[in-house]
Structure formats: C-alpha cells, structure tokens
Amino acid sequence: MKACGSVFKYGDNVDTDVIIPARYLNSSDPAELATHCMEDIDKDFVKNVKKGDIIVADKNFGCGSSREHAPISIKAAGVSCVIAETFARIFYRNAINIGLPIVECPEAAKGIEAGDEVEVDFDSGVITNKTKGTTFQGQPFPEFMQKIIAAEGLVNYINNK
Amino acid sequence: MGMTMTQKILAAHAGLEYVEAGQLIEADLDLVLGNDITSPVAIHEMEKMKVDGVFHKDKIALVPDHFVPNKDIKSAEHCKCVREFARKNEITNYFEVGQMGIEHALLPEKGLTVAGDVIIGADSHTCTYGALGAFSTGVGSTDMAAGMATGKAWFKVPSAIKFNLTGKLNKWVSGKDIILHIIGMIGVDGALYKSMEFVGDGIASLSMDDRFTIANMAIEAGGKNGIFPVDDLAIEYMKEHSSREFKVYEADEDAVYDEEYTIDLSTLRPTIAFPHLPENTKTIDEIKEPVAIDQVVIGSCTNGRLEDMRIAAEVLKGRKVKEGIRCIVIPATQQIYLDAMEAGYIKTFIEAGAVVSTPTCGPCLGGYMGILAEGERCISTTNRNFVGRMGHVNSEVYLASPAVAAASAVTGQISCPCQL
C-alpha cells in the first residue's frame, strides 16, 4: 500500500485544538469536521488540500485532547498520511484505530518541505521525496499494529477475532 | 530488573507475572469512561461491532460535562445519544445534569476509581486517578468503544520518569505550581509515552486535591499516566468515598527509570504558564512587566475542587473583582458546589463580583460560558493554553493556581495573593 501527494508542512507541538477547534465538536460528522480541519493553524488548508496529500510535522504532533475528531477530520479532508518526528500518544492510537496511516521519521520531517511531492510505502516504511530525490527509512509498525491497520481499524480487527 | 508501580498494575491486569517497557499487552479494564463529546463517536463505532451490548453495566461511566447544560441543538443531540445509549444498556454510572460534575472530579468523589485499577477514558485528563494509585490513561473514542464492548484494551508498557518530591510547599503555592514547574522543566513532550511516578517524603504534605491536580496534568507533559504511592491519606479518601476493594501496588526497589528528578517543594514559587504552551512557565517573580487581563476562570478538572474553592474564597474574602474584569468560578461537581455554599465560599464569590456557574468544562476548551474575543487575555486554573483554546485564535490563556487567578481578579493583572 502506498500514499503519494503534495506536502503541507508544520512545526512542533501541533495540538488537537488547532487541528479541530472545540467550537466544532458539537458535530461528529467526518465530512463536516473536514471543512474546519487545521483551521486555527492554517486557515487556507481546507481550500488547498487535495485528495492524497500528506502532512509533515516536527515533534509531538497531535498533542492535547483525546478527541478522535482530530484524526477523523484529517482523514476526511483527504490526507493520505501524516509523517512526524514524533506523535503524541493518544493521537497515535487514534490514528491507527481509525485507519489513518501515520509514520514516525525524524529525518523525513527535517528533509521534506512544504509543496514537495512525497511517496510513502507502508509495507517497507520507505519515504521518498520525489521533488528532492531523497529517501528516508520510516519506523515500521509493530506486528500487532500492522494487524489492526490491515483490518482497516480496531473495530474490524475485533470483529475478525 | 524490577517493575515500576505502573508496570506492576498492568502486569496484574494482563495476567502476567512480569512485564517490561515496550511490551504490548492486553489488559482487563476496571472502568471505561466517556463524556458528551467523545461518547457519541464511541457509541457509533460500537454499533459497527458484532457484540450484544456492553461488557459490564457497572464498569462504564458516562458523564455529559463538556457542553452541558446543552449549549446548542447539536450538543443537545449528542447528549441525547449518550442518554439513550445509557438507558438501553442499563449503564449504572450515567450522571444526568443535576447529578453530574466534571468527570475527573466526579468519579473519585463517587468512589468509582480506586488504587490498583486500570481505567481508560475517552478524555485526555483521565490520568487524574493516578492520584489514588490507579493506572488511568486517556484514549480516543474507538478505544472507548472497544473497551465498552470487550472490557479490554491494548497497551504498550511504558517506561517511567521518577519525580522525588521533598520538603513542604510555602503559603500560596499548591499542586498546580508543582506540575507547572515540572512541565516547564521537562517540556510538553518531556514524558512522551512514559509514566510519571511521583515519590518522596514531600508527598505526605500534599492534599488529595493537590495530588489530583498534579496527576491530571501529566498529559500536558505528554505522559501516558501520572501516579502516586498509596499512603494513609489516599486510603482515608477511598474509604470515605468508595465501598470498592482497592489494591496497593508499590514499585520494586530495583525498578528502572529513564530519568530521575528531585524537587524541593519549599523552593517553588507561584508559577504561571504563558501562551501558547503549558511549558512556557515563569514564576511570579520572573514577571517584570505587568500582564493585564480581561477574564479569570477558576474551575475545571484540574482546579475545580473544594480546596481550590477555599483558596479562591480566602483571597477574594472582603475584596472586589476589579471593575471591568470578568471572574468566572465553576465548582467541578454538585457536591463541591454544595460544600462551597455551606462553607460560605459561594457567598464570598458573589459578594466579590464573581459569577458562579453550574459544573461544566465550558470555557476550558472554548466551548461556552466564557469565550474570549480577539485580543483578550484570560488567567485560568485550567490545563491548556494552546492557540485559540478559549476562543478567538488571537486570544491568550495564562495557566495558574486558584490563588494566583483569584489575586489577579482583584488587581486586573497577573498577581500573587502576597502582592495584595
């Protein structure tokens, strides 16, 4: 499985309040949440994002609240993968549980800029910056998490057990 | 190699003699928690699972607290969804408006969280119950759904950081100042994926409310959980509030920690986190230029307990909220509200010119009941000061203790009671 798209780049500590502000949490509809994704950090994100695009950020992406609405809004906005130096732990769980691919890779976070065309191979963990002609080795998921991802989320994983 | 307190609790709930950091385990859950924001998503996910209802009707707690009493039609629909699910599944611990409170103040008060438990909650501040010696951690809605259906959750066993607290706090310094000091020291990802284990003879002098505040904000350092040893005070609290059996776990003497810090509590000063991260801390003495404020919030799962009300009342007694400043006080549960009323604190707040609200998370996350306009500043006893957290994207939140928040309400700028 591969993701390929144009990159939106952010810094350290992108919190769930800027990913999806609480003023929109009176809805749990993914399509509606997607229309406000990243609104308080990048008001043009929703206007510019195309299906398959990739978010790249520095450390502690998704810190703050446990709102699953955050990865839901990112996935529903069309983002195919989030690459970061590190992820906050609840966001990490939530992304896997809803089937939003995420990859921890400090080197890629540093070596990729906004607008670069990037390809991510989830089987090998290899991240290719097609614009710059560079590659990075992302951290592969433990086998247990691969099973959840292969089942397209925790609900199916439990149903299949 | 020995186990940390957290590792011992997880091992026991996974049916294992021994676990080590990094190991993936499946643990039995003693309690699964959700609120009016996260539960509707979990309920929707659970409907997709091939299960007949919940694993145990007594081991689920549903607390509408974020946007209640319902702030708008959409919130009302969410609350209705949670209410109907609770009825259909005969959930024992559903707390309607009138009985509810902010979840992390309410559950210990109701005796639903005790030492030795493994608890997950679809709210990041679920780590609060570590104050009682439980392993508790925040998860998302899908984990909550799986927990409600199966009574189990998967965890990666965390490594730990040890915080050795010594000495005693000075007047007007409290648990909030300790945890803000720690977050300022290690950063908002300083404990990422890890346990924060608090030990040391300084703990004996900390009230339960101080400990709840400290454990509550472990997540603001990225921690998986924060946990305290179970001493006589914790046992007394549990006996007073709960009929449940509790189990005391202690870290092995040869337990391994990634890092160790010693903090002399007597050296700590009132500490304030400046925008826009909880790690941007300054002590009151380090603030050289006056920081004028527009609003004060005293409440939340972090600092809405009775002791917080007592301290705020002590500062505001016989004083007035400065003209032009809005001071919003939110006791975290109905019981705390009642106790504060009987102790005369509510009268003090109203006479001082503060407004007192029914329990709600409201302003903390920019929901309602105190939203900031563009360019406004609030000093708040809540837990996060991210961009736009309490309202307009160009507003600011400063995090502080109830003592500092109340004193700032009087002066209209960030102040300590010792400066009044």
Image (tube, grey):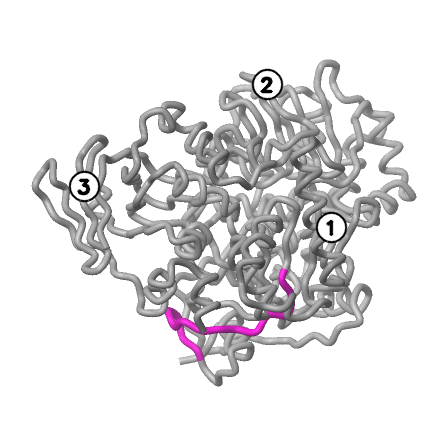
**Of labels 2 and 3, the one closer to you:** 3
Q: Which residue is mark 1?
A: B83
In primary-sequence order, the first of circles 2 and 1 is: 1
**B35 to A151, vertically: above or below:** above
Q: How many marks?
A: 3
Q: Are marks 1 and 3 on the same chain?
A: no
Q: Secondary structure at mark 1?
A: helix
Residue B24 locus on image (x, y percent): 40, 71
**The disc labelled 3 sits on which kind of residue?**
Val
Q: Secondary structure at mark 3?
A: strand
Please tell me in which quadrant of the rendered image residue A139 appears. bottom left
**The disc labelled 1 sits on which kind of residue?**
Arg
Quarter holding the C terminus of chain B is top right
Q: Which mark is residue B373?
A: 2
Residue B325 locus on image (x, y percent): 70, 19
Q: Are marks 2 and 3 on the same chain?
A: no
Name which residue lies at 65% across and 66% down.
B53
**Of labels 1 and 3, the one closer to you:** 1
Residue A62 locus on image (x, y percent): 42, 44
Name which residue lies at 47% across and 68% down.
A158
Q: Which residues are magenta?
A: B19-32
**The disc labelled 2 sits on which kind of residue?**
Ala
Q: In this view of the protein, which residue sits in the foreground, A1 or B203?
A: A1
Q: Mark 1 to mark 3: distance in Å? A: 45 Å
Q: Are marks 2 and 1 on the same chain?
A: yes
Quarter holding the N terminus of chain B is bottom left
Residue farthest right in this picture: B342
